[in-house]
Image (cartoon, rainbow, N blue to C red):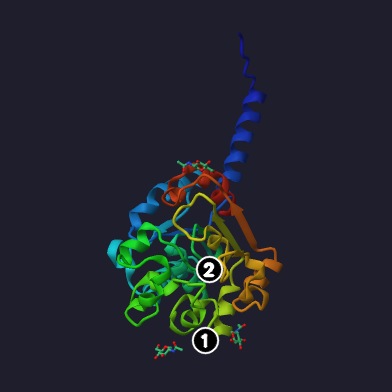
Amino acid sequence: MNVSTSPSTMWALSLTFSLSFMLASSVTYKPVIFMHGIFSDGKSGEKLLGWIKEAHPGTETLSIAMYEHLDSLKNMNEQVHDVGIQMMNFMKKHPEGINIICYSQGGLVCRGVLEQLEHNVHTFISLSVPQAGQFGDTDFVKYVFPQFLRDNVYRIAYTKEGQEISVGNYWNDPHHQDLYRNASQFLAVINNDTYNARSEEYRNNFLRLKQLVMIGGPNDGVITPWQSSHFGFYDKKLNIVEMKDQAWYKEDRFGLQTLDKRGALVTRVVPHVFHFDWHSNKTICDIYILPFLT
Ligand SMILES: *[C@@H]1O[C@H](CO)[C@@H](O)[C@H](O)[C@H]1NC(C)=O
Ligand SMILES: *[C@@H]1O[C@H](CO)[C@@H](O)[C@H](O)[C@H]1NC(C)=O
Ligand SMILES: *[C@@H]1O[C@H](CO)[C@@H](O)[C@H](O)[C@H]1NC(C)=O
């Protein structure tokens, strides 16, 4: 085959090349923070952040390496405070706004930050996060409260000592809602299920978000009920009450309904993913995460 490259073809090729180069380099991606889950660490985010940089060259990233391993069991408000300082420092360097991906318990730390601080987070990707709380005998709960079965965890979770443990802070026992509202120093506060003098401020901060993407699914195996990853939860009879039928949604107590009405709420139900695989599954990254990171 004889390929002739006339000067005009060459010229056209180089013009196309420089144009596409200019287009490509004019795309800038917002910086991304990853926040890890319980018993885990900052390193656990490296694979996902690597894929993101491959697909979106030039993305600046930060994986939060605080409250790692057993320290992840510490009080949630303490975690929100310290992680919030690190996140805000990163945001100050990026006044154009950032995106955050927060996994499992880390997603509750992130929601605390989003409600308590004047952040500039554009998109919050909530990756299998017990947003409405946890009520299940999963291995990690057994590890934290070994001698208790699900229906008895409240006896320790809703005490002063239990509230020093992260899981106690978002333990949501449908049979003991009065105790939960009285004792929960974290989940009940950020959901405005209990008195919070700063509830208006929390709502206004939360509404600085441009988009909330909630990813979770029925084969998760840890988040219980799994619908908690989409703000659904059990009623007293252990039937699922979806987000839109929850009191705090209907009364818009922390801004979720307003976000939804703005078209800023994205829900993705993804089957066949086990809890510990969400952040290390490339398909999840390609289909459910990358399209939202612009
Ligand atoms: C509410 O919690 C406080 C301590 O935080 C406790 O003294 C009080 O007895 C609790 N009330 C109920 C009704 O559980
Ligand atoms: C939070 O709940 C209280 C009542 O429990 C209510 O007075 C207050 O307006 C709520 N805050 C927001 C932001 O809706
Ligand atoms: C990865 O995610 C896809 C869904 O997008 C799922 O079908 C598949 O089973 C997952 N693989 C693993 C190892 O979790």
Determine whether 213 is above or below 287 in the image: below
What residue does disc 2 label? 132
Earlier in the chain: of badge 1 and badge 2, it is: 2
Disc 1, ligand 2: is the CB inside 8 Å?
yes
Identified at 50% across, 70% down, the residue is 111
Identified at 66% across, 68% down, the residue is 244
Identity of the residue furthest to the left in this view: 70
Identified at 62% across, 66% down, the residue is 243
What residue does disc 1 label? 196
Is label 2 in a helix, a strand or a loop? loop
How dense is the environment of label 1, judged by Cα within 10 Å: few (below 14), some, or many (20 and up)? some
Determine whether 216 is above or below 257 in the image: above
Q: Nearer the viewer, residue 251 or 237?
A: 237
Where residue 238 sits, quadrant-wise, is bottom right
Q: Closer to the camera: disc 1 or disc 2?
A: 2
Q: Nearer the viewer, residue 239 or 51?
A: 239
Indicate the amino acid at tag 2.
Answer: Ala
